[in-house]
Amino acid sequence: MTINYNLALAVYRHSLTTPDAPAVVSRGRTLTYGAMADRAARLAKCLAGSRAWPHGNAAPLRVGILASRGIDACVALIGACWAGAAYVPIGLRLPEERILTLLSLCNLSAIIADEEGAKLLTDRLLDACPPIVIHAGQPAACPRNDSVRLIAMASLPPVTPEEPAFMAAHESAYIIFTSGTTGVPKGVVIPTAAVRHYVLMIGDQLGLQPSDRALETCELGFDFSVHNMFSTWQAGASLYVLPATTVMNAVKFARSCELTVWNSVPSLAGMLRQVNALRPASLAGLRVTVFGGEQLPENTVTTWRSAAPNSRIVNLYGPTEATVFCLGQTITEPLPVTPGRGVVAIGRPLPGNEAAIVDAQGRQLADGVAGELAIAGVQLADGYLGAAELTMARFPVIDGKRWYLTGDVAIRDAAGRFHCLGRIDNQVKVLGYRVELEEIDAHLRHVTCADVVGSVAWPLVDGMARGIVSFVGLKTIDAARVIGELKAKIPPYMVPNRVLALENMPLNQSGKVDRRALHRLLDTETA
């Protein structure tokens, strides 16, 4: 039997069996599985009937999603999947230059924009857009030529939803862009088979149920959203979207919505802890808590256990290149803490995944010896879009098996549990987002015309980065101007909180900027 790997199949199936069950709840609006299927099928029909859609396998089908988390974004994403396309998230907070770069890299067949996304469609963006742009609001401009066709989402005629387009295991499910060392973002291409395996596996591991109400805290460009959305819809459960403006009221939101599944980065829990929002039994209705995207501090777990006494807590680890999460650690007693780090272990490989600690030559190391964490298994990405050499370097074949080299330093203990110790390179996590410090430096050099620059993740709270501080090798600098120009080039989470002039930049033995010395300068400043 030939398997259809289309990610929209779960929504279609539930639209037939439980059409009135809530699929997404956002800002007081509820979209049932039946309504979601209707809207997604209308989008898919429009995409399939457009002149932008190639016939056969002449070109990959890719649809940009210019939207923020919410009902319209979910419908756009499922509509793209329904039509047999890979979806490509384009964040609304990205500067125009960054969006133009993504459009130049992706060769999109169409774009679907929500109301806020439509407001970003300026003359420059429309000139770079694919032939079809479907929008839920009023675009900021009109096309200056007939190469782009604007279609209002509300004008799409009703259709009877049919089974989503057939997609084979090797076809692309989505492309998510991460920070790149050269200033150009890297597009990670994930095949449908990898996502399907992950969604089925994680739902089984967590025991998700149709009665569950799951929290969504992520934008589409953060692959944690793949877990939140598709694991929820696979179970026939309801996804509750936390508005970005009410993040600090997340506990109140969870209680009022009677959530049963919490999904977030640990830093959100840490911030809630700092403002004393996590009172004992304040989240007693939770039965599953999923933390992922960054290291989970021990003290966060202690507070969370008190606030959510009925919840199973699972710490999940995984790079985008291994389809969301590939290792997991259920919180047990005693707490499985990484020695000397004050953070929870990342655990053992999830079903279908393998992990190993390797040296620079790819040789596996003994337990207790630190090295690079390598991942293998069915969840590996195809590689990086249009970057064959980088793909070969990061996805080597070792002893006949394909691995992904994560760039994380880790050890495996005698019990077979893995512990993450940090980064080999200068890639860091800032508030859950993966950031290449070299990419910030590349833009700094351009903006300041300085040869020597250095950026560090700082401050660190509970072992996690809360922001970026950049140094420029000059006597003086107009920090406000530099930050303003950077905001036009890189996403907000990559923009430094501070830019400091440092004429005598510390260098290491290799002649490179000594980031550890920069950290020490900042630590001394606040001592």
Image (cartoon, rainbow, N blue to C red):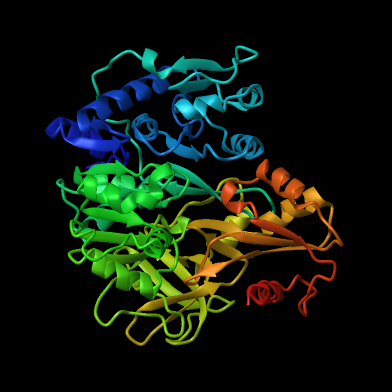
Between 108 and 249, the residue placed more toward the observer is 249
Is residue 98 positioned above or below 379 on the image? above
**Which residue is situated farthest in the left direction here?**
17
Across and down, in percent, residue 1 comes to 22, 42
Residue 57 relative to residue 99: left or right: left
Across and down, in percent, residue 94 comes to 58, 40
Between 227 and 350, the residue placed more toward the observer is 227
Residue 482 relative to residue 66: left or right: right
At 67% from the left and 43% from the top, the residue drawn is: 489
Residue 75 relative to residue 122: left or right: left
At 20% from the left and 28% from the top, the residue drawn is: 34
At 41% from the left and 48% from the top, the residue drawn is: 218
Across and down, in percent, residue 503 comes to 85, 67
Quadrant including the C terminus? bottom right
Judge whether residue 311 can be spotted in this image: yes
Q: Splitting the image into 4 quarters, where does residue 519 fall? A: bottom right
**Which residue is situated farthest in the right direction here?**
475
**Which residue is situated farthest in the front direction here?**
276
Across and down, in percent, residue 470 comes to 70, 60
Between 118 and 284, the residue placed more toward the observer is 284
At 48% from the left and 39% from the top, the residue drawn is: 89
Residue 201 relative to residue 451: left or right: left
Q: Splitting the image into 4 quarters, where does residue 136 fall? A: top left
- The number of callouts visible is 0
Judge whether residue 181 can be spotted in this image: no
